[in-house]
Image: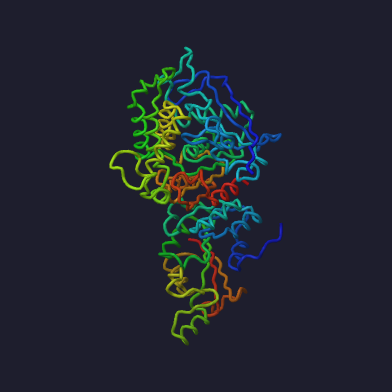
Amino acid sequence: MSPRNALRPDLEVIARNVAPGSRVLDVGCGDGELMAVLQGEKQVDARGMEIDPEAVERCVARGLSVIQGDADRDLADYPDHAFDYAILSQTLQTAARPDLMLDELLRIGRKAFVSFPNFAYWRMRFSLLLHGRMPVTRHLPVSWFETQNIHHVTVEDFLRLLADKGVTVEKCWFFTREHEIGGARANWRAEHAVFQLSR
Amino acid sequence: MATVLASTSSSLALAKPLKLDSGQALDRVTVAYETYGALNADKSNAILVHHALTGDQHVASPHPITGKPGWWNRMVGPGKPIDTGRFHVICANVIGSCMGSTGPASEAADGRPYGMRFPVITVRDMVRAQVALLDALGIARLHAVVGGSMGGMQALSFAANFPGRTARVLAIATSARHSAQNIAFHEVGRQAIMADPNWQGGGYYGTGKTPDKGLAVARMAAHITYLSEAGLTDKFGRRLQDRQARSFGFDADFQVESYLRHQGIAFTERFDANSYLYITRAMDYFDLAEEHGGRLVDAFARCTARFCLVSFDTDWLYPTAESRAVVHALNAVAAPVSFVELSAPYGHDSFLLDVPALDRVVKGFLE
């Protein structure tokens, strides 16, 4: 195994928990970092979808199978349970309908990994409380009017949605400042969350 | 300085008659082809490049009539995206064409040119002839098949009909079937040729008269479909040709008219009108789903190759939706497929022109 650059913490935890040799669809795969690791280290059959043509081009140039597509629309093209895992990292909050996208993930994949920034992280809450303005932080650096994050979500909101849909949380992980923290009072303490889900 | 790439021109006489989709068999078939780069010992580094409607086997070597550089010179060569330093590149003239492979201008059994006695062929028939060539060359499995436009149709047809024989399929600016609009444009071209009195029912060979006017009009109409509206506007606008004012006549007042007329006339110097009829017909008949019981998914059911499809945002002849339909079908059979719509200003012809992103995709996919 050749040394590689560290993945983002949420991707690292996903990479650790994907079963070797499985079939994976990475929705919003970017430059294909996670796919490359899964393929190289776990013999995973990894496929990707990415909306940015230049990112797709870079993926294809590194030998990955990636389709340019809009996850809001093009996930419909995949048959049921075509993959062992569908992965949606840091993309849920950009979806036109996050609830419907979650349905699609669990239709296409037998399991899903979903990661997102937690809008109820205490620094966010204080920022909003003190300044009365939409927080602009290290991880959400773009102002409200131009952010792609059109559906800000909290850990608690996400858990409610899962409960409404009858989705099972198999595992979950929480991060603050790139470090994994325990699950206690996660909605308050966690900057990021990663969920492993099944139906 | 540009150097001429070492190539080998060859032709192969097929040992057996070629069975065609029409039910007929074509006897005494010759396949003319060019090769570039060395074939390795286990014959595993061959890439078959399929040419488009009016293309030929001279993918990266000068055209024997016009002397112009090969039609994909920018893509094929040492260190280029299809690297002849690593790969053995084969490009064969399609049957029905006029650059050395058997076509309507070839001699029939009676010693006279076929003319319209040549059987109607299909894209799959073209591919069958190329597979016969690979058989003769002893190449069991290709590293890749690659093609744009009609070349992409051949690549898809190759994948669907000979699924074990290539590891990769790269289909650019193409479609799994010819649309009504595609057929309509081709019909305009064919009618222009057949309306030319010099066509003589296709029997013009040896008469000293060839349907150049008709063929030129066909090319003019087709050429428009290869470009984008923005590209035409950019290149010509409403600028006048060598004059200060409109002539109030029917000379080529506008630059775009002059350009198209030139394209039409230049085309007649290198292409046979009957070949144009036959090859456009083959493209019109192309419907990969129909060949496989009406479901495109079934066409790819036995495929083991990796696929890459590329479309261009300004290509209205084979728009992105056509590539997406192929991707959709490949997804349904869980084939490993990549797809990207590249942004380029040149319309359908983008696959032949300077689009650096295409170079990167081609190079990366063939690794």
Q: Position of residue A69 (x, y in %)?
A: 46, 55
Vertical arrangement, residue A85 with respect to residue B127, above or below:
below
Vertical arrangement, residue A107 with respect to residue B214, above or below:
below
Q: Is residue A56 left or right of residue A99?
A: right
Q: Residue at x 59, y 25 (%)?
A: B11
Q: Position of residue A173 (x, y in %)?
A: 57, 70
In this picture the colour scheme is rainbow
Vertical arrangement, residue B284 with respect to residue A147, above or below:
above
Q: Is residue B259 left or right of residue B131?
A: left
Q: How many marks?
A: 0
Q: Is residue A72 left or right of residue A121?
A: left
Q: Nearer the viewer, residue B346 or A15?
A: B346
Q: Nearer the viewer, residue A102 or B233?
A: B233
Q: Is residue A138 left or right of residue B253?
A: right
Q: Nearer the viewer, residue B104 or B145?
A: B104
In which quadrant is the N terminus of chain B drawn? top right
Single out the residue that lies furthest toward the top.
B110
Q: Position of residue A137 (x, y in %)?
A: 52, 77
Single out the residue that lies furthest toward the front.
B244
Q: Residue at x 42, y 51 (%)?
A: B234
Question: Quarter of the image holding residue A183?
Answer: bottom right
Question: Quarter of the image holding residue B264?
Answer: top left
Q: Position of residue B253 (x, y in %)?
A: 34, 43
Q: Nearer the viewer, residue B329 or B175?
A: B175
Single out the residue that lies furthest toward the bottom.
A130
